[in-house]
Every structure is written in C-alpha cells, then in structure tokens.
Image (spheres, rainbow, N blue to C red):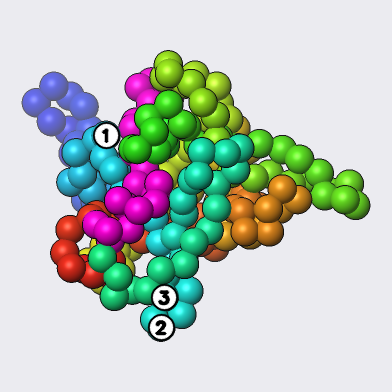
Amino acid sequence: MKNFYGFRKPGINTLVSAILLSTSIVILSSCSKDKDDKGSALDTGISWPSEWVLVTDRDAENYNYIYSNGTLVLYKGRVQKSYSIRSLTQETDCYFQFSPVAGAGKNVFTIRSYQNQDYWWGVYKTNSPFGAEEWYLGGDEDDDFPTKDNLRFILHFMPKQDGKNMIAIESYSKRGFYLEFLGHTFSGNGLSFVEHDKPESATHFKMLKPEGSGIGK
C-alpha cells in the first residue's frame, strides 16, 4: 500500500522493529549513564573540599586508622571504637582534607593533613631487601597546590556501611594499585599500594567526622 506521496507505507513488522530499536537505544543510553555516574563524588552529597578520618575494622572492639607524624611516611594506628574521634583528632594528626582536582577527571583528589596543610599525601617507590618494587604512602611538604601525578588519588565510592561513606583509594600515577594497611621497607607499620583488578577487591575505608561521643558515631 502506498501513501499520499506515492511511497510504500511501512508494514507492521517494520514499525515494531523501529519501536524496539528506539527503546533499546534509550535503555542502553540510560544504563551507560548510570554506569558512568556510579560512585561519583558529586553523588555523595558531600561539599568539597571536606575533611575525614579514615578507618577500617581491626576487630570487634578496635579500628585501624591512618595518621601522620610529619615524616616521609604515613602510619597505621589503632583506637577503640568507643573512643572519642574528636579527642583522637586533637591528639593525633589523623584528620585529612580531600580536594577535587579541577580538569583531572572524575573523582581525582589531592589529600593533605588538616593540621599541617603543607603536608600532602603521595605515592612513592622503594625496593624490598630482595629487590621487589614497593609502592608506599608517603608525604610531601609544599606550600603550593601540588601538580604532580603521584600526589593525586582516585576515590572509588562504595556502598555505605553503618550509614557512613566508604571509599577505596587508587593511585592516580600507578593505576590499578590501591591503598592497603600493609607495611613496607621503611616501616612495618606503614601503608602500601597493592595491585587489584577492581576497587571492590581493595580495602574500603570508612570516612568519619569528629562528631558524636564515639569514633563510630
């Protein structure tokens, strides 16, 4: 059958195929957007820059947490979950400021001490006594905003735990390597970057604020 202009009208099968194709494109586009937006720092409702204490469960009664003493490496500490996080931040340099890096891509941040704001987190390389490469979490003193790739990190936001934001921290300069509570040549109590195939396999750090009576509040 032809229409007014003399062209053959599309059959019902052609119309159904066209509708299904259009629907598929919309669905795929929506799924792609959801995948791209998953874990974005902009989706957390956090106002950046923002300050946090990072902890993981050590056992039922204690947390591991990250702290600095102003030296070339950062360290793992232990604190009871019932202890005041406000007191902890007053006693220890464990409160860190996270700032997005403009133009560097989604979820790229610098991290520095809130107490000593010239002290920036960085990823550095050393070797074990047996010659194996080790990538560790160290510090860099600089009164300017850092521009080197080893002083940048990719934050991967994970499902919340106990109502708290959770992140895996990937090295920006050493992609695929994530922060872990693993010692290295300079300190058995330090932190290292370990290779993982995906952020879900890496350590997830709980982000805490110095509010509430207990560190887990």
Q: Position of residue 129 (x, y in %)?
A: 88, 50
Q: Secondary structure at mark 1?
A: loop
Quarter of the image where one finds residue 166: bottom left
The 10 Å Cα crowd at callout 3, few under 14, some 14 to 19, many 20 or more, is some
In front of the other: label 3 or label 1? 3
The quadrant of the picture occupied by the N terminus is top left
Between 198 and 190, the one nearer to me in the picture:
190
The circle drawn on residue 49 is 1
Q: Position of residue 74 (x, y in %)?
A: 55, 47
Mark 2, residue position: 60
The residue at the point 43 percent across, 18 percent down is 143
Rounded to the nearest angstrom, the CA distance separating label 3 from label 2 is 6 Å
Which amino acid, mark 2?
Ala
Q: Position of residue 106 (x, y in %)?
A: 38, 34
Q: Position of residue 203 (x, y in %)?
A: 51, 61
Relative height, residue 214 to residue 68 (above, below) = below
Rounded to the nearest angstrom, the CA distance separating label 3 from label 1 is 28 Å
Magenta segment range? 85-108
Between 57 and 32, the one nearer to me in the picture:
57
Mark 3, residue position: 62
